[in-house]
Image (cartoon, grey):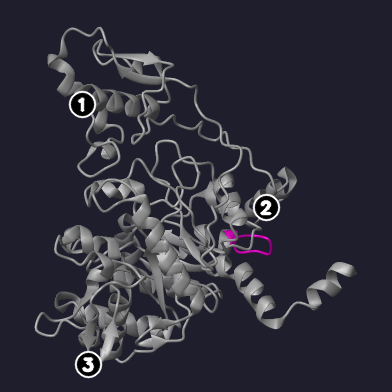
């Protein structure tokens, strides 16, 4: 009683601030990628989301273990269809109906998974794909949304296509957001897709990465990638843009307006900052970027083209993934706001209130033995060292050794030890994984330096999760099986 009276006596502004602090993180989404040699167990990941008050998650597939772990949590889910499946879904409406039955209806019950969106593909129109998915993405989207509609769930579960921001641009002669248009080679296709999304009440989903503006252009002004000022504004007919996120978002708004749908809801499916693998991929920059972004989201400031609106955003990503392709760049394996083991990298306040706080870490994570693999100090034939290091780095993550990265600058012995240990850990510390033709030896001495951490991998599936009883999880799983 006393506590209730005290709470009721709080000033209204303070009550509102407390309410937003509680709801702010729940309004955020997180991307949960699993391309890792030792991924965190799904239950541990879901517990991290819950412990940090995150209310939405975007997946890249419909993995049964992940979906089962999300059952009963109330976390909103964007389930996903990989690009490799688009052709089959485009070719046959029955295949799309079967996919919806197996991957959406299967989990759609009281106490099941709260699926809100289906992501049809992932950035399928990237220029680097050379048109591989140009002809199949829209038909796949149509077939999936129609299957959702036919199943009677299309009114609350919408299909969308997460697209890279390269699907729109401003002309070189008028490089301002208000001149934004869809890319010339896919303009007609994008127009048709937007009309279909609008007809079904579905949002446009776009991935925006200010970091890539820096990565792709050495002359890009650093401060323009952040939200805390210091950059020379871009003047768009009297409207001043002080950061590239706003400019990029409003370029899309202009492109949508040009095809008759300037009011279409827009979801930012991915936005984030990596912490390794490039000279601009630093934890300090990531902390700065997120602090500004989260503050902006909390203020509901919107953008110049859409002022006073909360932007639905999914941060990319939750956890580092050491098995991702590095074709776009070495930074690809370091997008996580958490390390590979679920531990936070830097201070981060998801409510956007600017508090100097750390995220709640993954609980109960168990590690492999305190063993590392390092260069054998007595090795004689170093002529084979290069080939063995190359082998190790082909099957393990050596991206921290690259230029501008955290482990760059060590001598040849240090580089070799890092590579050997990365492979040894990726292979779960198997004895045979630390030999390299006699060049390496297991050691209980940690070879890490002040700047470079030689990791010990986690025991996959060994995280102990508290907060949800085993019985509750079992009931959810049984319900899934019964429905199926």
Q: Which mark is residue 237?
A: 3
Q: Earlier in the sequence, mark 3 or mark 2?
A: 3
Q: Are marks 1 and 3 in contact (CB under 8 Å)?
A: no
Name, please, the residue furthest toward the front: 230
Q: Nearer the viewer, residue 350 or 428?
A: 350
In percent of width and height, residue 282 lies at 32, 50
Q: Residues within 10 Å of mark 1 (few under 14, many from 20)?
A: few
Q: CA distance from mark 3 to mark 2?
A: 55 Å
Name, please, the residue furthest toward the left: 173
The reply to whether the magenta stretch includes residue 197 is no
Q: Which mark is residue 411?
A: 1
What element does badge 1 sit on?
loop
Q: Nearer the viewer, mark 1 or mark 2?
A: 1
Pick the quarter of the image with the C terminus: bottom right
- Extent of the magenta region: 107-113
- Is 290 left, or right, of 150 in this rendering? left
Task: Say which residue appears at 28% left-offset and 75% top-offset.
Answer: 248
In percent of width and height, residue 239 lies at 28, 89
Q: Which residue is mark 2?
A: 476
Q: CA distance from mark 1 to mark 2?
A: 53 Å
Q: Nearer the viewer, residue 167 or 211?
A: 211
């Amino acid at each position: 009683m006393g506590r209730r009276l005290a709470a009721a006596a709080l000033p209204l502004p303070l009550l509102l601030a407390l309410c937003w602090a509680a709801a702010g993180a729940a309004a955020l989404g997180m991307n949960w990628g699993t391309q890792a040699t030792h991924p965190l167990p799904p239950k541990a990941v879901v517990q991290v989301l819950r412990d940090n008050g995150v209310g939405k998650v975007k997946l890249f597939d419909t993995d049964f273990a992940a979906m089962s772990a999300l059952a009963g949590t109330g976390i909103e889910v964007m389930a996903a269809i990989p690009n490799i499946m688009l052709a089959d879904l485009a070719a046959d409406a029955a295949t799309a109906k079967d996919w919806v039955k197996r991957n959406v209806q299967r989990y759609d019950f009281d106490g099941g998974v709260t699926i809100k969106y289906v992501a049809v593909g992932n950035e399928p129109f990237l220029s680097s794909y050379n048109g591989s998915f140009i002809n199949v993405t829209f038909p796949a989207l149509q077939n999936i949304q129609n299957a959702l509609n036919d199943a009677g769930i299309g009114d609350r579960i919408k299909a969308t296509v997460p697209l890279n921001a390269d699907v729109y641009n401003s002309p070189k002669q008028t490089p301002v957001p208000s001149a934004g248009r869809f890319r010339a080679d896919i303009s007609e296709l994008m127009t048709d897709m937007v009309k279909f999304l609008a007809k079904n009440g579905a949002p446009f989903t776009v991935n925006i990465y200010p970091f890539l503006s820096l990565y792709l252009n050495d002359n890009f002004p650093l401060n323009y990638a952040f939200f805390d000022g210091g950059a020379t504004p871009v003047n768009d007919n009297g409207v001043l843009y002080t950061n590239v996120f706003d400019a990029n978002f409003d370029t899309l708004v202009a492109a949508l307006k040009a095809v008759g749908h300037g009011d279409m809801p827009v979801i930012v499916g991915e936005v984030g900052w990596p912490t390794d693998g490039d000279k601009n991929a630093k934890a300090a920059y990531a902390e700065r970027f997120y602090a500004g972004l989260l503050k902006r989201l909390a203020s509901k400031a919107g953008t110049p083209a859409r002022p006073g609106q909360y932007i639905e955003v999914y941060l990319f990503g939750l956890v580092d993934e050491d098995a991702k392709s590095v074709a776009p760049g070495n930074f690809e394996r370091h997008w996580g706001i958490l390390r590979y083991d679920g531990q936070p990298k830097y201070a981060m306040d998801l409510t956007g209130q600017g508090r100097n706080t750390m995220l709640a870490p993954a609980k109960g994570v168990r590690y492999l033995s305190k063993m590392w693999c390092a260069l054998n100090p007595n090795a004689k034939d170093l002529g084979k060292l290069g080939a063995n290091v190359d082998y190790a780095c082909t099957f393990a993550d050596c991206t921290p050794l690259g230029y501008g990265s955290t482990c760059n600058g060590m001598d040849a012995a240090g580089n070799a030890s890092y590579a050997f240990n990365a492979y040894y850990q990726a292979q779960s510390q198997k004895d045979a994984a630390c030999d390299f033709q006699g060049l390496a030896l297991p050691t209980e001495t940690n070879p890490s330096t002040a700047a470079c951490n030689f990791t010990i991998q986690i025991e996959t599936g060994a995280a102990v999760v508290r907060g949800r009883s085993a019985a509750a999880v079992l009931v959810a799983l049984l319900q899934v099986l019964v429905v199926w």
